Image (cartoon, grey):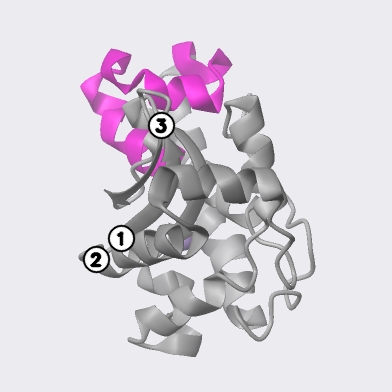
Protein backbone atom coordinates (compact mmCIF):
# COMPACT_ATOMS: atom_id res chain seq x y z
CA UNK A 1 0.00 0.00 0.00
CA UNK A 2 1.03 3.58 -0.44
CA UNK A 3 0.05 6.51 1.70
CA UNK A 4 -1.73 9.61 0.44
CA UNK A 5 -2.52 13.02 1.85
CA UNK A 6 -6.08 13.09 3.23
CA UNK A 7 -8.36 15.77 1.84
CA UNK A 8 -8.97 18.67 4.21
CA UNK A 9 -12.31 18.37 6.03
CA UNK A 10 -13.01 22.09 5.24
CA UNK A 11 -12.06 24.62 2.56
CA UNK A 12 -8.54 26.07 2.40
CA UNK A 13 -9.86 29.49 3.44
CA UNK A 14 -12.23 28.18 6.13
CA UNK A 15 -9.85 28.82 9.03
CA UNK A 16 -9.40 32.49 8.15
CA UNK A 17 -8.52 34.82 9.76
CA UNK A 18 -6.70 32.54 12.20
CA UNK A 19 -4.84 30.51 9.57
CA UNK A 20 -4.68 32.06 6.11
CA UNK A 21 -5.57 30.33 2.87
CA UNK A 22 -2.08 30.59 1.34
CA UNK A 23 -0.49 28.93 4.35
CA UNK A 24 -3.10 26.16 4.28
CA UNK A 25 -2.49 25.49 0.58
CA UNK A 26 1.29 25.35 0.96
CA UNK A 27 1.18 23.45 4.21
CA UNK A 28 -1.33 20.81 3.12
CA UNK A 29 -0.58 20.46 -0.61
CA UNK A 30 3.21 20.85 -0.52
CA UNK A 31 4.63 20.17 2.94
CA UNK A 32 2.33 17.32 3.89
CA UNK A 33 2.60 15.86 0.36
CA UNK A 34 6.39 15.83 0.66
CA UNK A 35 6.24 13.82 3.89
CA UNK A 36 3.90 11.34 2.22
CA UNK A 37 6.05 11.04 -0.92
CA UNK A 38 9.20 10.45 1.13
CA UNK A 39 7.43 7.95 3.40
CA UNK A 40 6.31 5.97 0.35
CA UNK A 41 9.84 6.07 -1.08
CA UNK A 42 11.28 4.73 2.18
CA UNK A 43 8.70 1.94 2.31
CA UNK A 44 9.64 0.89 -1.22
CA UNK A 45 13.05 0.09 0.23
CA UNK A 46 11.53 -1.89 3.09
CA UNK A 47 8.34 -3.55 1.79
CA UNK A 48 8.01 -5.69 4.92
CA UNK A 49 6.60 -2.62 6.69
CA UNK A 50 4.11 -1.72 3.96
CA UNK A 51 1.41 -3.83 5.58
CA UNK A 52 1.83 -2.25 9.02
CA UNK A 53 -0.62 0.46 10.02
CA UNK A 54 0.79 3.96 10.35
CA UNK A 55 0.35 3.72 14.12
CA UNK A 56 2.21 0.41 14.22
CA UNK A 57 4.94 1.76 11.99
CA UNK A 58 5.67 4.61 14.41
CA UNK A 59 5.45 2.35 17.46
CA UNK A 60 7.90 -0.13 15.93
CA UNK A 61 10.71 2.14 14.74
CA UNK A 62 13.21 0.01 16.66
CA UNK A 63 12.46 -2.89 14.31
CA UNK A 64 13.38 -0.93 11.18
CA UNK A 65 16.74 -1.26 9.44
CA UNK A 66 19.11 1.69 9.68
CA UNK A 67 18.81 2.38 5.95
CA UNK A 68 15.18 3.53 6.31
CA UNK A 69 14.86 4.34 10.01
CA UNK A 70 15.41 8.09 9.86
CA UNK A 71 13.32 8.55 6.70
CA UNK A 72 10.39 6.69 8.24
CA UNK A 73 10.76 8.44 11.58
CA UNK A 74 10.72 11.89 9.97
CA UNK A 75 8.23 11.32 7.18
CA UNK A 76 5.98 8.78 8.88
CA UNK A 77 5.86 11.13 11.84
CA UNK A 78 5.19 14.04 9.52
CA UNK A 79 2.31 12.22 7.85
CA UNK A 80 0.74 11.15 11.15
CA UNK A 81 1.17 14.55 12.80
CA UNK A 82 -0.31 16.52 9.92
CA UNK A 83 -3.20 14.08 9.38
CA UNK A 84 -4.07 14.51 13.04
CA UNK A 85 -3.58 18.29 12.91
CA UNK A 86 -6.01 18.98 10.04
CA UNK A 87 -8.72 16.99 11.80
CA UNK A 88 -8.08 18.81 15.09
CA UNK A 89 -9.19 22.11 13.60
CA UNK A 90 -12.62 23.33 12.53
CA UNK A 91 -13.87 26.72 11.37
CA UNK A 92 -14.76 28.78 14.42
CA UNK A 93 -13.83 25.96 16.82
CA UNK A 94 -16.31 23.53 18.39
CA UNK A 95 -17.99 23.37 21.79
CA UNK A 96 -16.06 21.80 24.63
CA UNK A 97 -18.31 19.27 26.39
CA UNK A 98 -18.82 19.44 30.15
CA UNK A 99 -17.25 15.98 30.37
CA UNK A 100 -14.02 16.93 28.60
CA UNK A 101 -13.92 20.22 30.49
CA UNK A 102 -14.09 18.21 33.72
CA UNK A 103 -11.36 15.81 32.61
CA UNK A 104 -9.04 18.68 31.70
CA UNK A 105 -9.79 20.39 35.01
CA UNK A 106 -9.08 17.18 36.93
CA UNK A 107 -5.72 16.78 35.19
CA UNK A 108 -4.53 20.39 35.00
CA UNK A 109 -6.61 22.37 37.53
CA UNK A 110 -8.85 24.12 34.98
CA UNK A 111 -9.33 24.53 31.26
CA UNK A 112 -7.43 27.80 31.43
CA UNK A 113 -4.56 26.13 33.29
CA UNK A 114 -4.44 23.42 30.62
CA UNK A 115 -4.34 26.03 27.85
CA UNK A 116 -1.59 27.93 29.67
CA UNK A 117 0.51 24.79 30.04
CA UNK A 118 0.00 23.81 26.40
CA UNK A 119 0.74 27.35 25.24
CA UNK A 120 3.97 27.40 27.28
CA UNK A 121 4.99 24.06 25.72
CA UNK A 122 4.29 25.40 22.22
CA UNK A 123 6.22 28.60 22.88
CA UNK A 124 9.04 26.60 24.41
CA UNK A 125 9.78 24.38 21.41
CA UNK A 126 13.23 25.49 20.25
CA UNK A 127 13.33 25.29 16.47
CA UNK A 128 10.83 23.00 14.78
CA UNK A 129 8.42 20.70 16.53
CA UNK A 130 5.01 20.16 18.06
CA UNK A 131 3.11 20.74 21.30
CA UNK A 132 0.74 18.00 22.40
CA UNK A 133 -2.05 16.97 24.68
CA UNK A 134 -1.54 13.24 25.08
CA UNK A 135 -2.79 10.32 27.06
CA UNK A 136 0.54 9.18 28.38
CA UNK A 137 1.95 5.70 28.92
CA UNK A 138 0.32 5.63 32.39
CA UNK A 139 -3.09 6.61 31.00
CA UNK A 140 -2.87 10.18 32.35
CA UNK A 141 -3.57 13.37 30.41
CA UNK A 142 -0.33 15.28 29.92
CA UNK A 143 1.12 18.20 27.96
CA UNK A 144 4.30 17.41 26.07
CA UNK A 145 6.32 18.59 23.10
CA UNK A 146 8.32 16.78 20.44
CA UNK A 147 11.14 17.92 18.17
CA UNK A 148 11.04 17.80 14.38
CA UNK A 149 8.30 15.38 13.28
CA UNK A 150 8.52 13.01 16.20
CA UNK A 151 5.11 11.74 17.24
CA UNK A 152 3.74 10.77 20.65
CA UNK A 153 2.92 7.46 18.93
CA UNK A 154 6.68 6.77 19.02
CA UNK A 155 6.56 7.03 22.82
CA UNK A 156 3.61 4.74 23.53
CA UNK A 157 1.37 7.78 24.03
CA UNK A 158 -1.96 8.65 22.39
CA UNK A 159 -1.91 12.10 20.75
CA UNK A 160 -5.23 13.85 21.43
CA UNK A 161 -4.42 17.38 20.22
CA UNK A 162 -1.31 18.68 18.49
CA UNK A 163 -0.06 22.08 17.38
CA UNK A 164 2.49 22.39 14.60
CA UNK A 165 5.00 25.10 15.55
CA UNK A 166 7.29 24.68 12.56
CA UNK A 167 7.72 28.11 10.97
CA UNK A 168 6.07 26.79 7.78
CA UNK A 169 2.84 26.57 9.79
CA UNK A 170 2.65 30.28 10.57
CA UNK A 171 5.45 32.40 9.11
CA UNK A 172 3.58 33.89 6.13
CA UNK A 173 0.91 35.43 8.34
CA UNK A 174 2.58 35.77 11.72
CA UNK A 175 6.29 36.01 10.81
CA UNK A 176 8.20 35.53 14.08
CA UNK A 177 5.12 36.04 16.28
CA UNK A 178 4.59 32.43 17.31
CA UNK A 179 2.57 33.48 20.41
CA UNK A 180 -0.02 35.17 18.17
CA UNK A 181 -0.34 32.00 16.10
CA UNK A 182 -0.80 29.94 19.26
CA UNK A 183 -3.50 32.32 20.50
CA UNK A 184 -5.26 32.03 17.12
CA UNK A 185 -5.11 28.23 17.32
CA UNK A 186 -7.37 28.21 20.40
CA UNK A 187 -10.12 29.83 18.30
CA UNK A 188 -10.30 26.90 15.88
CA UNK A 189 -9.75 23.78 17.99
CA UNK A 190 -12.22 20.96 17.34
CA UNK A 191 -12.77 19.79 20.91
CA UNK A 192 -15.24 17.17 19.73
CA UNK A 193 -12.40 15.49 17.86
CA UNK A 194 -10.20 15.60 20.97
CA UNK A 195 -12.98 13.99 22.97
CA UNK A 196 -13.51 11.28 20.35
CA UNK A 197 -9.84 10.35 20.50
CA UNK A 198 -9.86 10.29 24.29
CA UNK A 199 -12.95 8.06 24.39
CA UNK A 200 -11.52 5.74 21.75
CA UNK A 201 -8.09 5.72 23.42
CA UNK A 202 -6.76 6.21 19.89
CA UNK A 203 -5.45 8.97 17.69
CA UNK A 204 -8.06 7.78 15.12
CA UNK A 205 -5.60 8.18 12.26
MN1 LIG B 1 3.74 21.31 9.27
Relative to the observer, which residue lies in front, 84 or 72?
Answer: 84
Residue 54 position, x and y percent, is 53, 27
Residue linked to disc 3? 140
Determine whether the residue tagged by mark 3 lies in a helix, strand or loop: loop
In what quadrant of the picture does the C terminus appear?
Answer: top right
Q: Quadrant of residue 63?
A: top left
Of pointers 2 and 3, the one earlier in the residue sequence? 2
Residue for point 25% across, 26% down: 67
Query: CA gap, disc 3 to disc 1?
Result: 17 Å
Q: Residues within 10 Å of mark 2 (few under 14, many from 20)?
A: some
Q: Above or below — where is 48 with respect to 29?
A: above
Residue for point 38% across, 55% down: 131
Residue for point 38% across, 66% down: 116
Identify the magenta region.
48-77
In what quadrant of the picture does the N terminus appear?
Answer: top right
Q: Which mark is residue 121?
A: 1
Callout in the foreground (2, 3): 3
Q: Is residue 204 visible?
A: no
**CB of mark 2 within 8 Å of CB of mark 1?**
yes
Relative to the observer, which residue lies in front, 10 or 41?
Answer: 10
Determine whether the residue tagged by mark 1 lies in a helix, strand or loop: helix
Instruction: Decide if residue 127 is on the left or right side of residue 200.
Output: left
Query: CA gap, disc 2 to disc 3?
Result: 22 Å
Residue linked to disc 2? 124
**CB of mark 2 within 8 Å of CB of mark 3?**
no
Amino acid sequence: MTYSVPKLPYDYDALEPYIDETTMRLHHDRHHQTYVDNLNLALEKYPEAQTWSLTALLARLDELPDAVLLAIRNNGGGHANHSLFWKSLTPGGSELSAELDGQLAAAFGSLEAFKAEFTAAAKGVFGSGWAWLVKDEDGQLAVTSTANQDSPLMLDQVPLLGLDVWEHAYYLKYQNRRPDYIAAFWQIVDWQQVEKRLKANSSLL
